[in-house]
Image (spheres, helix red, strand yellow):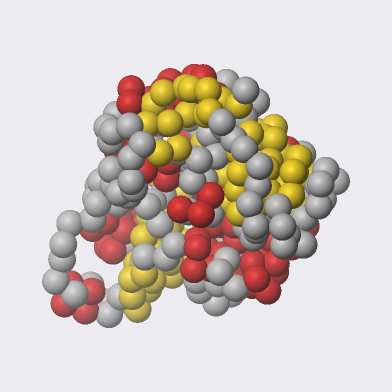
Amino acid sequence: MAKAVRFYEAGGPEVLRYEEVEVGDPGPGEVRVRHVAVGLNYADTYFRNGTYPIPLPNGIGVEASGVVVAVGEGVNNVALGDRVTYTGFLNTLGAYSTERLVPAAPLIKLPGTISFETAAAMTMRGLTSAYLMRRIYDFKEGDSILLHAAAGGVGLIVSQWAKLLGLNVIGTVSTEGKAEVARAHGCDHVINYSEEDIAKRVRELTGGRGVDVVFDSVGKNTFMASLDSLKRRGLMVCVGTASGPIPAFDPVLLAMKGSLFITRPALADYIADPAEKADLVGELFDHVGNGRIRIDINQHYALEDAVQAHRDLESRKTTGSSIFVI
């Protein structure tokens, strides 16, 4: 019988339960996938703690890789036996499972150059990095970025991709150990925000100018420092709220700090168009498959250890990508 992690109330990691579940046969437009690896993402904690409200009880997780073992009526983008990966949002919720039904539309066929584990570790993080690097801003060689959580799963991919584009990368981390990881993946400069003033150090590193773009996945604790690190008419990209939601602010603040721009993008809006998704997938898989971007899987968990995995993630004990191995 299949197993899955579910939760019946919003809360801390302890609300997660590892249970037996009935899967059934795929309906029209669906497939049944036997998972080999499942991604652990910070977004999962937002579903669990109620930041992203969903009907309960429910499954958790939005990213996994595996093999198609049954195909429903009307499915023509994948076939029985295909190696696939997927990520999404509500339409793929429930990935923490050994086997499940999933809509066929989000499925991405895996090339032979990408393993199941690598796919589970990078589909969401990699596509996020792809749209950040290729769709958010028209980067030119020599541009500078400030990248928070530079030793995290997205951070390590973005920093490598940024170097391929010839960018100057300033990363922030919380420990010296994470600083070493960030440097090894392309960060030109690393700021330990536990010890240094972020904006002051960014100004020093950029000759007082500030960076062109800030990628901020931390939220509340870094928001003002991020704005203060931008050049005049620079772009603030809010890609997460690991420390909590950004406080409400008067938009005139953006004018006062240099006519700044701000955006809060979501992956779903950058892969909604099939052609655009295919372009981003193709570029990501090409970089990874040819070794230009490496995916570090630094934490492996069993699915029944989801509670501990979430505790490790929220206590910032992880670096790079984390996955569940089925």
- Left or right, 95 with respect to 281, comes to left
> Is any part of residue 122 visible from this angle?
no
Q: Position of residue 147 (x, y in %)?
A: 45, 53
Image quarter in which the N terminus is found: top right
Residue 64, percent across and down? 62, 41
User: Percent x, y for residue 192?
Assistant: 38, 39
247 shown above or below 252: above
Q: Residue at 16% across / 62% down in the picture?
A: 248
Q: Residue visible at 19% across and 75% down? A: 251
**Residue 133 coordinates in the image, percent (x, y):** 57, 64
Residue 123 vertical placement versus 168 (above, below): above
Camera-nearest residue between 81 and 186: 81
Task: Please state which of residues 268 and 20 is positioned toward the viewer in this rendering.
Answer: 20
Image-quadrant location for residue 146: bottom left
- Where the C terminus falls, by quadrant? top right
In the foreground, 4 or 287: 4
Residue 10 sits above or below residue 51 on the image: above
- Using the rendered image of the protein, determine whether residue 234 is visible from the camera's viewpoint: yes
Q: Is residue 35 left or right of residue 42?
A: right
